Amino acid sequence: MKKRLQSLLRWTARLILYFFAFSILLTVFYRFVPPPVTFLMLQRCVEQKSAGKKMKLEKDWVPMKEISPAMALAVITSEDQKFEEHSGFDFEAIEKAQKYNERKKGKKVKGASTISQQTAKNVFLWPARSYIRKGFEVYFTFLIEVLWSKQRIMEVYLNEIEMGDGIYGVEAAAQTYFHKPASKLSLGEAALIAACLPNPLKWSPAKPTAYINRKKAWILRHMNWIEKPEW
């Protein structure tokens, strides 16, 4: 019994060591190479197939220099105004979200994920709500903050995030909704895309609702208050 326990502990230690080594190497690899596909993309393809729809996955990686500066500014304004300041986590926003959710028990949960956290989740993890997945999210957020630059985090975020049904990344979104490359997006178009990001399967820049137009206007007003990234 003792030998079996020791053997189990050795194997467990090896698995943990292999996980840390692999995760660090993969994070370093993605610092230079575009992630080819994400768990969310695969899940959406399965959902489309199960619903009898044609599988759709439109994604065209473009470097940061080929993305309109307005796009990064719009998502920072909308999603994470302290992106340049924090080290992956906005603890003030987390505290506010916790207090809000305590008051609104049983209603829609308010999140406080930073762009770094969303990037870690999109690239490395599966889409689900659980403490285990959240723990991995914290770990991978720490890794990309240490091993990537803020510019790289934003570049990966804008290229991998879901922006519509089967549409991933800002280049595919720009071509689909505005028939132009991401480099040519205007302030208004960037703000409209950013306004839809919390639920890109419900809202579309092609058919903005009154709510999305109000949010777009809010983003445009506040973009003037956000310091532009120096990338």
Image (cartoon, rainbow, N blue to C red):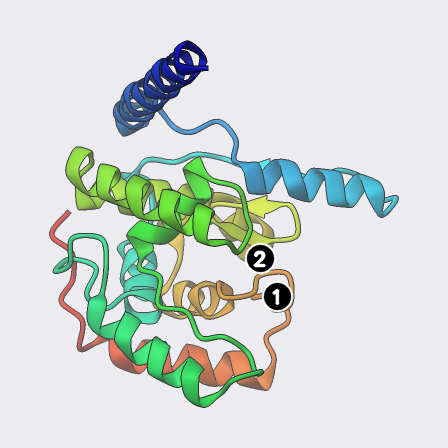
Residue 189 screen position, x and y as percent: 44, 65
Residue 19 screen position, x and y as percent: 36, 23
As rendered, which of 129 and 16 lies closer to the eye? 16
Q: Residue furthest bottom?
A: 103
User: Which residue shows up at 70% across the image and 39% down it?
Assistant: 45
Q: Which residue is mark 2?
A: 177
Identify the mark at residue 206; answer none if there is no mark: 1
Type of amino acid under label 2: Tyr
As rendered, which of 40 and 56 lies closer to the eye? 40
User: Which residue shows up at 50% across the image and 75% down it?
Assistant: 109
Disc 2 and disc 1 in contact, CB within 8 angstroms: yes
Type of amino acid under label 1: Ala
Residue 123 screen position, x and y as percent: 43, 38
Quarter residue 141 falls in: top left
User: Which residue shows up at 20% across the image and 43% down it?
Assistant: 145
User: Which residue shows up at 49% across the image and 66% down it?
Assistant: 198
Identify the mark at residue 49; answer none if there is no mark: none
Q: Residues within 10 Å of mark 2 (few under 14, many from 20)?
A: some
Quarter residue 6 falls in: top left
Considering the numbered disc 2 on the image, is that residue within a helix, a strand or a loop?
helix
